[in-house]
Structures are given as C-alpha cells and as structure tokens.
C-alpha cells in the first residue's frame, strides 16, 4: 500500500441540519428529505440509497410539509406561507405561490395526484388543482378554530381527515364541509393537559382514522360514527409522525423519545379471519426526536433532530439477504464539502452560509509506522468568508495554487482573488460576474489554475480563463440532445486538455478543451455516477457508480481499458459490493501510474492494477502481513485492493504530494455533542 505521512484533520466543525420531513414516491422508488435549513434532498432507493439530487436551503424556507404528486412532481410548504414546486431536472425552484392562509403546517396530495390540499395557521384548508405547468387555487373548506397540523386523504379521494388541537375533523371533499368532529382526550398519564396536539393522521380504506398526538397515544377512530375504537399509549412524550404502507397492513410511528414503533394487522387466531392492530416491534436507532417517518414496501424510514436518515429493512419483505437487508444510517451528504490546494497545503471547508480556509500544520519530527508526530507548526485559520443574503452556498472550490476561491448560491456567483504577504492574507472579489454563471451546481479549477470550469443548472458548461484579478469567458458547451439536466460532477485532466462531466441519469460526456468540442460520451450505465477523475499521462477516465462498480475508460481510444474489461468479466469481491456508502472521491499517485486512490465515508482504498484481483474466497480487508512472513507467501496473498478503515467518518482524503495524505474526519460524537439535549428517560436501576 505504501507508507504515507497523514494529516488527520478534525477541525471541520460541520453539523448537518436536522431532518424535518420525508416523502416516499412508490412509482420512482425515490425518497425526498427536507431539512430544517430548507435543504431538500432526493435519494434513489433503487440505486443503493444514493443522494442523487439536492436543492440548497434558504433562511426563510422552514419546510413543514413535503409530498409527491402526479408521479414525479415534488411540492413543499412551510411557515412562510408559500407552496413550492421543484424542478427535478434543473435542480432549482420552478415557482412559489402564497396560499394566503398564514404559515402552512400540513400538505397532502390526492390519491389521483391531481389535487393538493394544505392546512394553514388560520384554520383554513385550501384545495389546489395541479395543472401541467402550475397549481391553481380551487376553493376553501370550512374553517376550523385552530391551526391544521396534519392531513390525510381517504384512498377513494372522497373524504379528508384533518388533525388540529384537541380535535380531528372529517371533511367531505365534494361539499368542503366537516361531517364529523372527534374530540381527543387530554388525559396524559392520569394528568389533564391543557392541549392535545394531533401531530399526524392516517385515513384507511375501511374508514378507520389513525391519529398520533402529544399525549403519547396512537388512537383508532371510526370515521362513519365519529367514535373512538381503540387507544395505544406508546410513549411518555409526543408521538410526532405516522406513515402507513400501501397495502394498509402495517404502519410506523415516531416519538419524541427517539423510538420508532411498528404496528401490524394480524389475525386474532390462526383460524379466524378477524384481524386487529398489534404493536410488534420497537426500534431505538435515534437519540433525539423522530420528526418524520415513511413506509416503503420493504423498509421503515425515519429521520429527526439527530440528523440521521435511518432505513430499517423489514426482513420478511426482503427476498435476498444481502446489503438490502442491513440497517442503514445516512448522516453526511453524498457530495463534497471540502476542496484542497495542494501547492499551498490549504483546505477550504463549505458550510451553509460561510467558507473557512485553513492552512495545514507541519512537523519536523520523524517516527516509525503508526506513530503520532508532534506538530512544530499548528494549523492556521486563514479566512472566514461569510455570504450575504439568505441563500445557502451550493458549491465551492479553491484553486490548486491557492490564489482563487469560487463559490455559488442559487442566484449569485462569486470569484475571489487571494494575495499572500508573509502571514497576512488579503481578498479581492472580482466584480461584474456574468449572469449565466448564476446557480452553478459544480465548480472546478484546472491543474495549473488558469481556467475555471462551471456547470450551470441548465445543463451547460462554461470555461473561464483566469487573468490577474479578472477573467475572460472562453466558451460554453451547451446541454446535449436538448436536455436541461444539471452536470453534478466534473473532472479535468492534469494537462488541462480534457473535461469530463456527468449528470444524474445521462452518460458521462467528455469534452476536448483544446479544440472546444464534444469528444465522446461514455455509454450510460443503470446506476448514477458518484465520483470520477482523469488519470495523468494515460488520460484514462475512472468512474465510480452507486452500486460500487468501477469503470476505466480510455479517452484517447474512446473505449474501456483492458483492465476495466477484466474486472467486469471477473467481478468485484462480494464484500466490496456490499458496502453501503458511495465512493465520493478518486485521485491518482503522481509517480505510480498503476495506483488508483479512492475513498467513501468509512474506508480508504488503493487499487494496484498490476496485482491480481481478489476473488470471493480471498480476504478482502487483509491486514498487513507479519514482518517475519516470507516474501513468497506475502506475494501469494497480495491482491489489487489495499483497504484501510482507520479513518472514519471520512469526509475527504487526497494526496498532497508523493508521500503525504490529508484526511478530514468528522466523528459522530462531536456532532451529537452540538445538538440540543434529548428527552431524559428513566432507566432501570438509576
């Protein structure tokens, strides 16, 4: 594997935003997740739960509701009173519309997907018609006395259940009138509370309404008579969310204590056709409030204040017991928040509303393998660059020479020139950036820092020449075949002649920067690209996909390399394919052309193409052989994959020079320590 001096960086003080809503789309098998800072993420559950798209947050967009309608159309609503539709191709907001009912607390699409209903702060329910290009207000329902906190449509689309404070109302959609009002008991553990908040409702086909409330109860109501049928007391705190399976044979609820409960419809006796709801499984995978839950055909999905997205497979629904049957916790975004200047040994950290530039420390000490060396010079915090306005930063990058920083928000693009004088640093912002650079989704500098490549959210790629304190627009590659899909990943060859760009569904496009034309398109693959890079000298393009497959494509020859064909013919080790975190970065050793360096959140790997590939009988995660072992045995057990799991969670890793690595870790305990304290629970024996 080779010996490296490693900079272990743990001062990237990144804390993900808490999860507020999740919405599962059964048609496309995708999951939409909204966070407390307004960010919305799209996970492709068919592509190994890869986060294939995201929409940046905004200070005024506190999302309270999220839902899919008409197949692939995604809507959100929040406390600013606006309904937002997202453009899933261009990765921006298509439009926003004021509902004129104050803050919006709940939203639900009709079973047909043609209507959208929102519940507002003023007690009003507003029905919107979903048209091909926009939504249009249709009418109001009867106004209630308090805010509408939860909504659910009957599967037939004829009735609606609405939860507010102390009350559940059932509406007739045709007339807009409330036909039943069901008062909820305020009793909580024998004590009468002032208010009982109905956090979630679910309307079943047989007319049953299931409610969850702030008194820790799950209750079943008969909507035809407006009467309570059964009560389950499941928590000493709020039950905040509920989701029902499509078959209506199970549902899941999340509590403020961090527990997720699974209810199933089971037969009373083995010979009886009568069924009843039974609480079957509790899961404690969260440390804080479970704010939202979803129920896919094969898994229970939950998210909350502790920032984890937890996917808990239902073992009886999973046919093949591979990595699909394993519990998953997704904490960090599947995109890069860190860039590196190798020449000046700088790291640029991206946060929601600011950038931090650090210079790495250094040491003159020496030691043997595994030693921790003392720093002779500490790391320096050089720059804190805060953005103006309420928009979150989408992407950022520092140039390899360390003299340029570029970053983008949804409406502005910024380019800054850095000047270094001894220990002082000055920043000059380049003015009058062209409008077509706005809403950049990816930024990359060339190896010699003379060019800047910008991918816009309209599918086009811009090439900018960097001058002393200014710039010149060289060329724009327009979107291919009339699509407007954003190119979320970029890679440029070290010689600056080739540029590779990839979207979420199309193949990888390779452009000739010298002659300013499209060179070739790598054949499209079934799974999205998670990382790509171009090797020096050979100009081979290495592509990693979300199903853990790796391809090597020769750009000059316009075909896959012999090594790539060999590895596809033999197949990867089964343990490699069962990893559940995507590869997020690929790089190369400048003096070892046969080595490919890559990492995900929990391992760093060097692939040596000169060695044989491991088969399923070989130990993949092979520890270093003993020093007294003979070279013959060592060679016999050696294979191409050299894997280290020492650094985790690993957000970034790259070579600074031939013998130096930088690894940026973000321990989960440091994130939990910065979250608000969870609800204190009495433990046995304390």
Image (cartoon, rainbow, N blue to C red):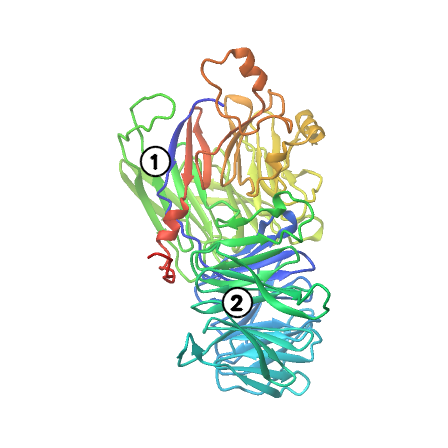
* Residue 373, horizontal then vertical, whole percent: 31, 28
Of 445 and 219, the residue lying toward us: 219
First of labels 1, 2 by sequence position: 2
Disc count in the image?
2
Q: Which residue is mark 2?
A: 241
* Distance between the alpha carbons at the discs numbered 1 and 2: 45 Å
Residue 462, position as x, y percentages in the image: 57, 46
Q: Nearer the viewer, residue 628 or 429?
A: 628
Q: Is residue 81 left or right of residue 117?
A: left
Residue at numbered disc 1 = 360
Picture quadrant where residue 664 is located: top left
Query: Would residue 469 be found to the left or right of residue 440 on screen?
Result: left
Pair 1/2: label in front: 2
Quarter assignment of residue 579? top right
Q: Is residue 8 above or below residue 109?
A: above
Residue in the picture at 36% in, 59% down: 676
């Amino acid at each position: 594997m080779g010996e490296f001096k490693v900079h272990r960086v743990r001062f990237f003080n990144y804390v993900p935003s808490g999860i507020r809503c999740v919405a599962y789309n059964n048609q496309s098998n995708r999951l939409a997740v909204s966070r407390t800072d307004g960010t919305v993420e799209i996970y492709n559950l068919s592509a190994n739960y890869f986060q294939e798209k995201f929409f940046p947050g905004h200070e005024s967009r506190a999302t309270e509701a999220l839902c899919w309608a008409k197949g692939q159309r995604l809507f959100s609503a929040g406390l600013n009173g606006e309904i937002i539709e997202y453009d899933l191709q261009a990765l921006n907001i298509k439009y926003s519309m004021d509902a004129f009912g104050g803050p919006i607390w709940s939203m639900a699409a009709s079973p047909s997907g043609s209507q959208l209903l929102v519940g507002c702060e003023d007690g009003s329910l507003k029905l919107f018609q979903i048209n091909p290009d926009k939504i249009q207000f249709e009418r109001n329902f009867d106004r209630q006395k308090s805010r509408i906190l939860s909504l659910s449509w009957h599967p037939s689309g004829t009735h609606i259940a609405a939860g507010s404070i102390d009350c559940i109302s059932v509406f007739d959609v045709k007339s807009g009138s409330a036909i039943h009002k069901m008062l909820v008991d305020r009793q909580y553990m024998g004590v009468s509370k002032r208010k009982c908040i109905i956090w979630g409702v679910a309307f079943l086909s047989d007319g049953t309404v299931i409610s969850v409330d702030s008194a820790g109860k799950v209750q079943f109501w008969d909507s035809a008579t407006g009467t309570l049928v059964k009560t389950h007391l499941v928590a000493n705190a709020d039950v905040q969310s509920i989701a029902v399976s499509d078959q209506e044979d199970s549902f899941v609820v999340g509590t403020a204590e961090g527990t997720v409960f699974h209810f199933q419809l089971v037969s009373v006796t083995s010979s009886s056709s009568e069924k009843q709801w039974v609480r079957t499984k509790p899961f404690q995978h969260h440390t804080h409030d479970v704010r939202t839950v979803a129920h896919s055909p094969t898994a229970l999905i939950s998210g909350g204040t502790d920032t984890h997205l937890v996917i808990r497979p239902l073992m009886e629904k999973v046919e093949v017991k591979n990595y699909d049957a394993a519990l998953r916790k997704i904490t960090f975004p599947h995109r890069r928040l860190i860039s590196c200047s190798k020449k000046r040994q700088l790291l640029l950290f991206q946060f929601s509303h600011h950038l931090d530039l650090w210079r790495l420390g250094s040491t003159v000490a020496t030691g043997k393998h595994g030693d921790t060396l003392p720093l002779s010079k500490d790391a320096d915090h050089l720059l804190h660059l805060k953005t103006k306005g309420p928009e979150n930063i989408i992407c950022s990058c520092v140039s390899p020479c360390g003299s340029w920083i570029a970053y983008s928000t949804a409406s502005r693009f910024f380019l800054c020139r850095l000047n270094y004088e001894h220990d002082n640093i000055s920043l000059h912002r380049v003015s009058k950036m062209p409008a077509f650079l706005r809403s950049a989704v990816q930024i990359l500098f060339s190896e010699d820092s003379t060019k800047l490549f910008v991918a816009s959210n309209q599918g086009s790629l811009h090439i900018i020449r960097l001058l002393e304190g200014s710039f010149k627009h060289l060329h724009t590659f327009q979107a291919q075949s009339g699509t407007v899909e954003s190119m979320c990943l970029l890679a440029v060859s070290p010689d600056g002649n080739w540029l590779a760009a990839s979207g979420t569904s199309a193949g990888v496009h390779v452009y000739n920067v010298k002659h300013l034309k499209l060179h070739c398109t790598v054949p499209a693959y079934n799974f999205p690209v998670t990382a790509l890079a171009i090797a020096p000298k050979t100009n081979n393009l290495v592509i990693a996909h979300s199903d853990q497959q790796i391809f090597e494509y020769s750009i000059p020859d316009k075909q896959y390399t012999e090594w790539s064909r060999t590895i596809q013919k033999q197949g990867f080790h089964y343990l490699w394919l069962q990893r559940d975190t995507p590869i997020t970065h690929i790089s190369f050793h400048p003096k070892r052309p046969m080595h490919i360096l890559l990492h995900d959140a929990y391992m760093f790997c060097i692939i040596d193409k000169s060695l044989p590939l491991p088969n399923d009988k070989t130990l993949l995660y092979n520890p270093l052989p003993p020093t007294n072992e003979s070279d013959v045995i060592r060679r016999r057990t050696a294979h191409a994959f050299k894997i280290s799991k020492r650094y985790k969670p690993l957000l970034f890793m790259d070579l600074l020079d031939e013998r130096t690595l930088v690894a940026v870790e973000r321990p989960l305990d440091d994130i939990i320590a910065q979250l608000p304290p969870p609800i204190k629970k009495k433990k046995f024996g304390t």
